[in-house]
Image (cartoon, grey):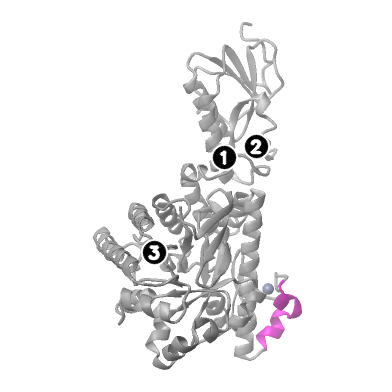
């Protein structure tokens, strides 16, 4: 059990938790967003970060170390004074520079000691961020090096500074899983899923989802997970549902520099906006035309402030959704705003079985919002449970009213399938579903019928439906008698 992280509430793979950062004597509520601060290019003063809700930031110790004067000031004053921030401070090690420029002039021991000396609260060793799509051999070699560095990091005297254990493995989910298992076995503290930036820059949220799901399989449930380089609010809900607890945003500043305006649905160009679709102080006090006419520095700062507001607002929404038990409804809403987040959500659903184990058995009403809802973990769990129920004799499975001629009479509801009537008031069978169900919902329910019939070969079943599509009925095994209630009157089994 890792005592730096406590989970307070869960939904799907998402959790609200407390990350205890002993050196800063601060407890950070997760999911948390760490604004990235480049000490040489301050866009928004870190002293103001608490206006947005930031409890922790991240800066780069390698950039500081390379600049002798800055390094000296950091050693003397400490990072918190240098940046004017009294929350928790995480530092990166130069690994990103290594991936960008191919070499750096420091190593794990030296940079960890430097991070300790300048007062970092969470330090990082020099891991190898293997880019996506490389040959497997390279991904394996570089992962071995990263693992050696993590083992080395365990031996460095860092005092009460926490240390990151990055999880690499490129686009190979099984390597991510091995990497997660190895990192979790060290005594390091926080687990960043590394080298996701190139995937995120190309909006490859499905690959990000597969990498995170792989890492999560290797890591213990109590491991705090950081999705390194994830700063776009359009993917926070998805990334949290996948089990990420920390995010860092350089996007708020980098996008602002290019006149880009973040929203939870994607990115807008300031030049295209006639109205600000946002209720933050910046967007209520200014209009786009006014901001366009401002000098560069002022415009950049205002856009960066909006970008921070919209990002922290989305994180608060995500946290409330976890507490309410409707995180997947939020993920689904975000998924349907952009084809790439939809790809990401579908990749999450490919791992629904993995996430079913952490999903609460009972929560707020299940809303069937699109065909994707038919693949949610709750639907799989219900289907699984059908094996443990005991229907006997001749059982009517019906969308219509009961019929006295049968030994038992169960309800059928897409996308779940059949269930005993006494379960109808229990989650998730209280689900709100559309009047016009889609094919995927019917198919999922028909698979439930198939599972029930398969698990109980000695029970006879009649299925009475309201004109289900033929594609869905194809999933119902032939030994189940089907009756279309719109065409035939239901009679007893012996008629
Ligand atoms: Zn705004």
Return the disc, 2 or 1, that comes first in the chain's sequence: 1
Disc 1 target residue: 378
Q: Nearer the viewer, residue 162 or 149?
A: 162
Tell me how far mark 1 sits from mark 3, CA to CA: 32 Å
Labels 1 and 3: the sequence-earlier one: 3
Q: CA distance from mark 2 to mark 3?
A: 38 Å
Which residue is labeled 3 in the image?
Answer: 165
Pointer 2 residue? 427
The image quadrant of residue 418 is top right
Tell me what residue is drawn at x 27 percent, y 66 percent.
145
Residue 141 visible somewhere in the drawing: yes
Which range is magenta?
280-293
Quadrant in the rendering for residue 484: top right
- Residue 310 image offset from top left, x and y in percent: 64, 69
Name the residue rendered at 56%, 45% in the picture.
372
Q: Secondary structure at mark 3?
A: loop
Q: Earlier in the sequence, mark 2 or mark 3?
A: 3
x 51%, y 21%: residue? 453
Label 2, residues with CA under 10 Å away: few <14, some 14-19, many ≥20? some
Q: Are discs 2 and 1 less than 8 Å apart at CB?
A: yes
Q: Nearer the viewer, residue 154 or 341?
A: 154
Which type of secondary structure does the marked residue at label 1 adopt?
A: helix
At 46% from the left and 46% from the top, the residue drawn is: 351
Let me know if residue 471 appears in the view: no
Q: Secondary structure of the magenta portion, mostly?
A: helix
> Which quarter holds ligand 1?
bottom right
Q: Is residue 321 left or right of residue 196?
A: right
Do callouts 2 and 3 mark residues in contact (Cβ within 8 Å)?
A: no
Where residue 74 appears, as percent x and y from the top left, is 46, 86
In the image, residue 39 lies in the stretch drawn in magenta: no
286 inside magenta stretch: yes
């Amino acid at each position: 059990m890792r005592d730096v992280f406590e989970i307070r509430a869960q939904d799907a793979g998402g959790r609200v938790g407390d990350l205890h950062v002993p050196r800063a004597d601060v407890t950070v509520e997760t999911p948390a967003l760490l604004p990235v601060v480049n000490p040489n290019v301050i866009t928004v003063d870190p002293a103001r970060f608490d206006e947005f809700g930031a409890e922790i930031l991240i800066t780069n110790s390698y950039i500081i170390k390379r600049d002798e004067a800055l390094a000296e000031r950091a050693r003397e004053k400490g990072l918190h004074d240098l940046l004017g921030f009294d929350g928790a401070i995480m530092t990166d090690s130069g690994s990103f520079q290594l991936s960008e420029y191919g070499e750096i002039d420091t190593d794990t021991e030296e940079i960890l000691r430097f991070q300790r000396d300048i007062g970092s609260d969470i330090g990082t060793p020099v891991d190898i961020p293997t880019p996506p799509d490389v040959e497997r051999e390279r991904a394996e070699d570089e992962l071995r090096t990263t693992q050696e560095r993590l083992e080395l990091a365990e031996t460095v005297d860092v005092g009460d500074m926490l240390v990151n254990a990055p999880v690499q493995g490129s686009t190979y989910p099984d390597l991510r899983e091995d990497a997660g298992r190895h990192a979790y076995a060290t005594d390091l503290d926080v687990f960043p899923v590394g080298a996701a930036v190139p995937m995120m820059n190309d909006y490859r949220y499905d690959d990000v989802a597969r990498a995170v799901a792989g890492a999560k399989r290797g890591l213990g449930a109590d491991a705090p997970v950081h999705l390194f380089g994830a700063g776009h609010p359009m993917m926070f809900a998805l990334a949290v549902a996948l089990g990420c607890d920390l995010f860092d945003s350089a996007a708020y500043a980098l996008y602002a520099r290019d006149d880009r305006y973040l929203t939870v649905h994607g990115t807008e160009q300031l030049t295209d906006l006639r109205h600000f679709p946002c209720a933050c102080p910046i967007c209520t006090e200014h209009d786009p035309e006014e901001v366009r006419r401002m000098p560069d520095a002022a415009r950049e700062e205002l856009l960066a402030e909006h970008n921070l507001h919209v990002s922290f607002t989305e994180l608060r929404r995500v946290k409330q959704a976890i507490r309410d038990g409707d995180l997947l409804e939020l993920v689904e809403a975000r998924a349907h705003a952009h084809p790439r987040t939809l790809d990401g959500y579908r990749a999450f659903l490919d791992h629904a079985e993995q996430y079913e184990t952490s999903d609460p058995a009972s929560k707020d009403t299940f809303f069937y919002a699109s065909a994707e809802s038919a693949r949610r973990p709750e639907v799989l769990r219900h289907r699984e449970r059908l094996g443990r129920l005991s229907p006997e004799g001749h059982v009517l499975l019906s969308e219509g009213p009961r019929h006295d001629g049968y030994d038992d009479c169960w309800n059928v509801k897409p996308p779940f399938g059949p269930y005993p009537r006494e379960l109808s008031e229990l989650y998730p069978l209280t689900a709100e579903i559309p009047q016009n169900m889609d094919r995927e919902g019917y198919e999922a329910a028909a698979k439930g019928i198939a599972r029930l019939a398969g698990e109980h070969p000695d029970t006879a079943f009649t299925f009475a439906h309201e004109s289900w599509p033929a594609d869905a009925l194809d999933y119902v095994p032939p030994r189940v008698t089907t009756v279309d209630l719109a065409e035939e009157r239901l009679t007893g089994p012996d008629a």
